Image (cartoon, helix red, strand yellow):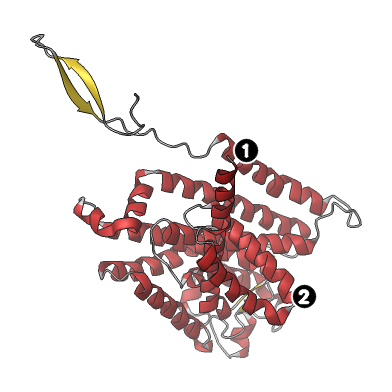
Amino acid sequence: MSAAPGRPQASSHRSPQGEGISMIPTLILPSKAPLLTRKGWSAWLAALVVLCALAPVLNLWVPADSVFHLSDFAVGLIAKIMCYAICALAMDLIWGYTGILSLGHGLFFALGGYAMGMYLMRQIGLDGNYKSALPDFMVFLDWKSLPWHWTFSDSFIATLFLVVAVPGLVALVFGYFAFRSRIKGVYFSIITQAMTFAAMLLFFRNETGFGGNNGFTDFKRLLDIPIATPSMRMTLFVLTASTLLGFFLLARWLVNSKFGRVLQAVRDAESRVMFSGYSPLGYKLTIWTLSAMMCGVAGALYVPQVGIINPSEMSPANSIEIAIWAAVGGRATLIGPIVGAFLVNGAKSWLTVTYPEFWLYFLGALFIGVTLYLPDGVVGLVKKFKGGAK
């Protein structure tokens, strides 16, 4: 009778004196799981080819009157949803695998977007309505010079750094004090929501230098290249797709590593992790900060494609939607939140045009229905059907 894999097995060893056989228990650890299975790599490569090779061909080279043409509207919509999918994936790392429900991730998304938006506003140059080197809203408010926090906004390299550094630093400081105080559960969710609401009110003020209620818009160029051209639009689309697929591989590597196993142990029994000699603070703070940085990158990719960033992106409702995407798709699956982001936002795009007055009711009913009847989300439901079919 063979022992179960990964369970301790007794091995036979003859003593040096030849006095018989002694049974010394040995532990056979399970082999390390691959990053992706063969089917997983096939699906990942297929997604890479479709998004980064086929989509540009269908949009740029297939005639507009062809049934196979991918319209500019579809390109913009898919690109926007892929940015949302990055946020959903980031949410899954902290909620699905660590048990930390954040209702403030919209703040990190918006901070990354504002960092990119500041650079795009400087790229307008003298092409604004007032023909000034200052952004139009500053001229309108009679500002004489740029505020201190706009110092490096004319550098693309500095902007790339700020896109991840600003959300990461805010998350690091907030998370350190929250996790050190052992705030968890619904209390943590409430204070994250309060954090993003306070930031939204701050960014609404004109004197902060972030455009107030209107935010940033009317972008002209990116890296001195016109931003409204088909080639730039498709370049941003491919960059967004590559980032999403790259973050997915990073997330898979993290959750399959020892670090990821500790995160799941913290989610299931944090007190036992502490008794085992691990400090949950460092693990929770690391994944929390990484998750915020991922949302910052998503915001930076979102702004040049949508063409606007304002404080409404920080609204608590937006952060709640990120949690809904993860829940609908399936927590602790990585692919589930991505699926959830596409399903919910695809439905939103259709319903807000066809039945705009029913969209919020649909969203609320969806969240309640998933919580009550689909605790494992869409991906969990598919797995259940596959298991029943065997």
Identify the disc placed on residue 360.
none
The relative height of residue 37 versus residue 129 in the rendered view (above or below) is above
The relative height of residue 18 versus residue 247 in the rendered view (above or below) is above
Q: Are marks 1 and 2 in contact (CB under 8 Å)?
A: no
Q: Residue at x 53, y 50 (%)?
A: 248
The relative height of residue 231 versus residue 1 in the rendered view (above or below) is below
In the foreground, 304 or 252: 252
Label 1 sits on what residue type?
A: Ser
Where does residue 280 sit, x and y in percent of width and height? Answer: 28, 58
Label 2 Cα crowd, 10 Å radius (few <14 / some 14-19 / many 20+)? few
> Taking the image as drawn, is residue 230 in sight?
yes
Where does residue 389 sit, x and y in percent of width and height? Answer: 60, 43
Q: Residue at x 51, y 52 (%)?
A: 334
Label 1 Cα crowd, 10 Å radius (few <14 / some 14-19 / many 20+)? few
Q: Which residue is mark 2?
A: 354
Helix, strand or loop at label 1? It is helix
> Taking the image as drawn, is residue 113 in sight?
no
Q: Which residue is mark 1?
A: 42
User: Residue 311's quadrant in the figure?
Assistant: bottom right
